Image (tube, rainbow, N blue to C red):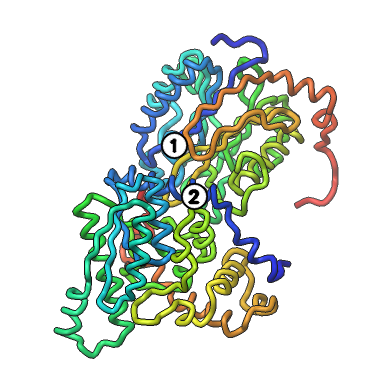
Amino acid sequence: MAATGTLLRIGLAQIDDRLGDVEANVERHLEWIARAREAGVDLLVFPELSLTGYHLLHLTPRVALPAGSPVLARLAEAAGPMRVVVGFVEEGETGALHNSAAVLSAGEPVFVHRKLYLPTYGIFQDSRFFGEGRRLETVALPWGKAGVLICEDLWHPDLARRLAATGVRLLIVPSAAPGRVGAPADTEGGLPESHQTWELLTRSTAVLNTCWVAYCNRVGWEEGAFYPGVSHVVRPGGEVVQRSPVLEEHLLVTEIDLRDADRLRWRLPLLHNERFDIEGPAA
Amino acid sequence: MIQREEVRGRLVLDASLAEAVLESFIRDAVTTAGAQGVVIGLSGGVDSALSAALAARALGPERVQAFLLPYRTSSPESERDARAVAAHLGIPHRVIDISPMVDAYFDAAEPEAPADRRGNKMARERMTVLFDQAKKLDALVLGTSNKTEILLGYSTVFGDNASSLNPLGDLYKGQVWQLARHLGLPSGVIDKAPSADLWPGQTDEGELGFSYETADEVLYLLFELGLRPEEIVARGYDERAVRRIVSLEQRFRFKRRLMLIARLSGSAVNLDQEIPRD
């Protein structure tokens, strides 16, 4: 579908994957890319580390690819005019490995975000196997400026604020967030306890930064931990527009207008008023 | 800071979601392994009944093969309850008497062995039967150990604590009961006193010296909230029970990490080289 103005159809591919099996995962990506193209999606988002699975541990180096790998080029080619965000283990120019997400456009990767905050607590072991990203950048999409933050990055709100302050109107958040089952949910949709918290975070990000948030979480099991999915799109201001089901592979297609962020910003000039010059206690 | 009255409420589970997640766990493990289904030993107790029920829902009852594995001193009520569970779930079951295998060893080599060693042998004998049947049926062995037992080390090494996959290992005993009620399992199985039935009249709570309710709450405060033992006692829990729970947990940690490997190389399996099993 040709890009027109600020209106786009975003697709969140909430998929399962095979841990450490890039070849099998590429085939899955090709299937979901084809499905998304049929659904007229303009921008398709896969979860964090979608090409490899998340809990790789010492398999990490075996599945690493440079951003220029033919594997990514093949997906980019299959995407045709559609933009695709895909997660992979990136072998960087220094040989360090990164937990990265690439934006594919017109047959090639045009942007790579390296995860900036590597959770290493509880079941998370990111910094044992990955190098931290060092740069926060925006990516120019045909509908406007966007930013990519991977999972834990969203828990450090300064990043979203900096992106929004430079004109980003859409935050794309690929994630591999494991679920927890707690007490009976009193919110609609029967969300796992863990993802009630995630929605609190995506929604407050959309409120505080007056931007769209597209959160794509994987489904399935790895090493006894489940990933519930419940990917969703949040409107600037914080309303969840659509949400995928729990634990099922699903393509969530939502029409969004990036202009909505501007319209809200005119009424609610939080970003305009944002101050980066306040003196006070340093951390 | 949390008060004792609040703890029980914290242990209440979203039963519908827990059911969906655990069924997905079993389906995923069986599919990933390329197995035909699961085998499970039904004891007549609530843990194995719940595991079997989750598997029957996840895979369909015909892909869950139950085994009743009585020893000659096992209580007839246990077998009756196990049969009732199999009938309730519509899963096929087979009875294999483990007395000849267990007795052969003790009669020939260790006639003076006391009840606890015989009980451990029974638990291991059952697991060897289940793993053999799993090989024959191209199935996985479904485990039934709950989180309370695992943390207290209340299990037999390479006996009931050995399995291919365990849907109950992150559920406290009270949560097992809660989920069993949610799934509508026979009330006789849910309401009876938990017992390993390793000798006549044995009950878990009698042997442990505290109730499962106390164990669940104390373990929750220790592990999930990070309270120290004295802070737990200060909330009104019996000091002797708390001390015993803490000491069991420490003493039996080895049961949670089987096969300790001596590291020589810098690439020791599971220490330097953590390769995921999935």
Q: Is residue A234 above or below residue A247?
A: above
**Residue in front for this viewpoint, A118 or B223:** B223
Q: Which mark is residue B19?
A: 2
Q: Is residue A79 above or below residue B173?
A: above
Estimate the x, y position of residue A60 in percent, counting from the top left: 41, 44
Which image quadrant: the N terminus of chain A?
Answer: top right
Return the chain for callout 1.
A
Estimate the x, y position of residue B14 in percent, counting from the top left: 58, 52
What is the three-letter code of the residue carrying label 2?
A: Glu
**Residue in front for this viewpoint, B19 or A37:** B19
Estimate the x, y position of residue A142 in percent, counting from the top left: 61, 15
**Residue in front for this viewpoint, A249 or B123:** B123
Q: Which mark is residue A135?
A: none
Q: Is residue B13 left or right of residue A209?
A: left
Say if residue A114 shows up in the picture.
no
Question: Splitting the image into 4 quarters, where does residue A212 fall?
Answer: top right
Return the chain for callout 2.
B
Q: Is residue B37 left or right of residue B257?
A: left
Residue, disc 1:
A16
**Residue depicted at 14% across the width and 84% down the height:** B108
What is the three-letter code of the residue carrying label 1?
A: Asp
